[in-house]
């Protein structure tokens, strides 16, 4: 009997910047800032766009900051991802691409499609690092998606991916 040959499975990454946050409460810690009115409108709107694009991540990993976790929950609900399966990591509440690369490298290889919900400038820097096109800014509630030519998350590297879409609210106005 012949051995089965397995082709490497590409990885897909969705980078989601949290929706617009409120600065209404100046004494509130940055971590605790909620979504503002526009953010509460744009997060479900982008969730609906992602549902139309048939986005179905195996994992949603979010910053635990209020504005990011709210965005993650709203989008998860719109794409029918179980809210209890969202994972939160303090390491995603970071503003450097290198920190996010470290997070991604530690993902389980059984995860083929991962969604990170976080913050700029880290997400924009990461999209330009892994993608085949430079992105100058992922706006609030923006979503960058790339197919990565890697079989293991540990192999993520410069220009390892091809952008498949880049969606954001103002694109649809």
Image (cartoon, rainbow, N blue to C red):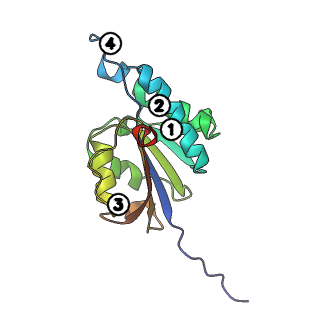
The local secondary structure at tag 1 comes to helix
Could you tell me how far apart the alpha carbons at marks 1 and 3 are, in whole angstroms?
21 Å
Label 4 CA crowd tier, 10 Å (few <14, some 14–19, many 20+):
few
Q: Is residue 31 above or below residue 16?
A: above
Label 1 belongs to which residue? 46
Q: Are marks 3 and 4 in contact (CB under 8 Å)?
A: no
Residues marked 2 and 1 touching at CB (< 8 Å): yes
Q: N-terminal of the two: label 1 or label 3? A: 1
Indicate which disc residue 24 carries: 4
Quadrant in which the N terminus is drawn? bottom right
Judged left or right of residue 119, residue 173 is right
Left or right of 57: which side holds 102? left
Indicate which disc residue 42 carries. 2
Where, quadrant-wise, is the C terminus in this rendering?
Answer: top left
Residue holding disc 3: 131
- The residue lying at 30 percent from left, 52 percent from top is 135
Query: Which one is in front in this view, the residue at disc 1 or the one at disc 3?
Result: 1
Res 58 label: none
């Amino acid at each position: 009997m012949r051995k089965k040959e397995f082709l490497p499975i590409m990885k897909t990454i969705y980078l989601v910047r949290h929706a617009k946050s409120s600065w209404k409460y100046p004494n509130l810690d940055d971590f605790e800032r909620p979504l503002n009115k526009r953010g509460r409108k744009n997060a479900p709107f982008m969730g609906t766009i992602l549902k139309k694009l048939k986005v179905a991540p195996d994992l949603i990993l979010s910053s635990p900051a209020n504005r990011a976790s709210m965005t993650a929950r709203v989008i998860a609900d719109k794409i029918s991802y179980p809210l209890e399966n969202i994972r939160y990591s303090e390491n995603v509440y970071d503003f450097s691409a290198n920190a996010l690369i470290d997070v991604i490298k530690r993902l389980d290889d059984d995860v083929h499609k991962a969604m990170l919900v976080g913050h700029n400038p880290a997400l924009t820097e990461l999209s330009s690092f892994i993608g085949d096109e430079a992105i100058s800014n992922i706006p609030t509630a923006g979503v960058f998606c790339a197919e990565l030519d890697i079989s293991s998350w540990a192999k993520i590297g410069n220009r390892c991916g091809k952008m498949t879409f880049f969606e954001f609210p103002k694109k649809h106005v």
